[in-house]
Image (cartoon, rainbow, N blue to C red):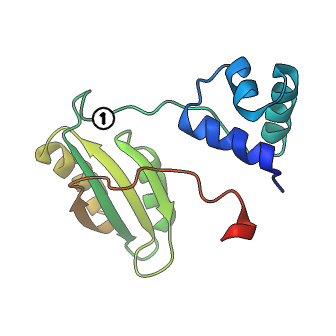
Amino acid sequence: MLDSTDRLLLDCLAEDARLSLKELAARVGLSSPSVSERMKRLEERGVIREFTVAIDPEVIGYAFQAMVRVRPMPGKLHLVEKMLRDVPELVECDKVTGEDCFIARIFACSMAHLDRILDGIAEHAETNTAVVKAQTVRRRLPPLDLGET
């Protein structure tokens, strides 16, 4: 599991993944080589999967964000799954239980753009779309200390 230093290190990285090893070391009270070794172990264990960048889609032209529930027609599950993977504006998709099989997050420049994306799926699946008004909780880490939950 994670010790308190690992949790602190992950909290710091979640806040700003661009922190230097020197800054991380100062924040967690270790030397830079020790932090580097801990980071390497966290990556090897699969705790840290990747480092990424967060952008504001609206600033680059995506005026709409939609959550789309997707229910493939009978026998079309694998085809729809491949189709969803091939939609570049689809930035995130989960395979779920229940009546729908997928819940996808899609960015679009306009309502017409969103309609064109959904029209490409409609031949093989039913969709139910909700336009996102605001993202009240951004993607974040779950609690790192399971003993406290």
Question: Nearest the camera: 47 or 29?
Answer: 29
The C terminus sits in image quarter: bottom right
| 62 sits to left or right of 98 | left
What residue do we see at 37% from left, 73% from top? Answer: 73
Q: Which residue is mark 1?
A: 57
Residue 83, percent from left and from top: 42, 51
Looking at the image, how many numbered discs can be counted on the residues? 1
Question: Nearest the camera: 132 or 116?
Answer: 132
Residue 20 falls in image quadrant: top right
Question: Nearest the camera: 61 or 127?
Answer: 61
Please tell me how crowded label 1 is: few (under 14), some (14-19), or many (20+) other residues with Cα within 10 Å: some
Residue 60 shows in this picture: yes
| 147 sits to left or right of 131 | right
The N terminus sits in image quarter: bottom right
Residue 48 falls in image quadrant: top right
What residue do we see at 58% from left, 40% from top? Answer: 14
Residue 114, percent from left and from top: 20, 48
Classify mark 1: helix, strand or loop.
loop
Residue 61 falls in image quadrant: top left
| 86 sits to left or right of 4 | left
Residue 64, percent from left and from top: 20, 45
What residue do we see at 23% from left, 63% from top? Answer: 130
Q: Amino acid at mark 1?
A: Pro
